[in-house]
Image (cartoon, rainbow, N blue to C red):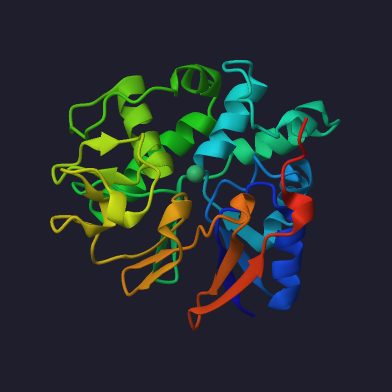
Amino acid sequence: MATYAIGDIQGCFHSFQNLLKRFGFNAEHDRLWLVGDIINRGAGSLEMLRWAYEHQHALVMVLGNHDLHALAVAEGHVPQHRNDTLQPILDAADADQLLAWLRQQPLLHREHGYLMVHAGLLPQWSVEQAVELAAEVAAVLRGSHYRDFLSQMYGNQPNQWHEFLQGIDRLRLITNAMTRLRVCTPDGQMEFKFTGELQDVPAGYQPWFDLPARRSRNAVIICGHWSALGLQQRPDLYALDTGCVWGGKLTAMRLEDRAIFQEPCSPEDLPRKI
Ligand SMILES: [Mn+2]
């Protein structure tokens, strides 16, 4: 039995299947941790979501911004973006079942000495506090008012954590940090436009994981979301988004020995031109 954490799949279902073969995945004995953004932009979003649903006993996942976007689109709160590949999910006979399952997934998972989150954590948050804050959002997504949350989820404000935040502002802030964060100021003001490489981080900002005052430094964090960052392997951070859907690779790390497995993007996964 082994546990494999896998970076952003984004509907790259063939690459995902090839990666599973590469490390000999056995759904009866092994476990998968998916860092979120399992769907959208790649050609196999429906196939990927269905596979995750059917193998839910063998995996844990945390929600990424694209997964949440699918939920908001399905509820009619926002239109699809030009490059979205969500329509086959929306049109599927089992769409309600698949999306209801997706909505039950957490924003953070902590087990075996690892903490998995899609994007990042703000410097003011200890691990314990981050676990509690993620649970606040998960409770709303699983509750009867999830549509209210999804309809007000979008927006970049507030962009900084305060203990006194309440209601939708608090939920949006937590969600934005955990599913969209790449860089912020030393006091945790988030910036969402920047998607580039490390050497191009805008003046006054730093990668969230490099802030010296970050209170979660004692954790070993597994994340994705920042494809231009590339694979990062350091004792406190394993960043696994290696841009498969952009023609890069899909990356897995075996948690027991931190061995890395990579699969080049399968051409079949690239979005079909309309
Ligand atoms: Mn993402």
Q: Residue at x 44, y 18 (%)?
A: 152
Coordinates of residue 165 in the picture (x, y in percent): 23, 26
Q: Quadrant of the C terminus?
A: top right
Q: Judge left or right: residue 129 versus residue 34.
A: left
Q: Judge left or right: residue 13 versus residue 31.
A: right
- Above or below: residue 9 compared with residue 220: above
Q: Residue at x 48, y 53 (%)?
A: 227
Q: Quadrant of the N terminus?
A: bottom right
Q: Judge left or right: residue 236 versus residue 74.
A: left
Extreme residue in the bottom direction: 257
Coordinates of residue 188 in the picture (x, y in percent): 19, 41
Q: Residue at x 58, y 40 (%)?
A: 104
Q: Which is more toward the observer, 35 or 197?
A: 197
Q: Which is more toward the observer, 144 or 94?
A: 94
Extreme residue in the right direction: 93
Count of numbered circles in the view: 0
Coordinates of residue 199 in the picture (x, y in percent): 29, 56
Coordinates of residue 16 in the picture (x, y in percent): 70, 61
Quick check: can you spot residue 117? no
- Above or below: residue 178 compared with residue 141: below
Q: Residue at x 40, y 43 (%)?
A: 195
Quick check: can you spot residue 175? yes
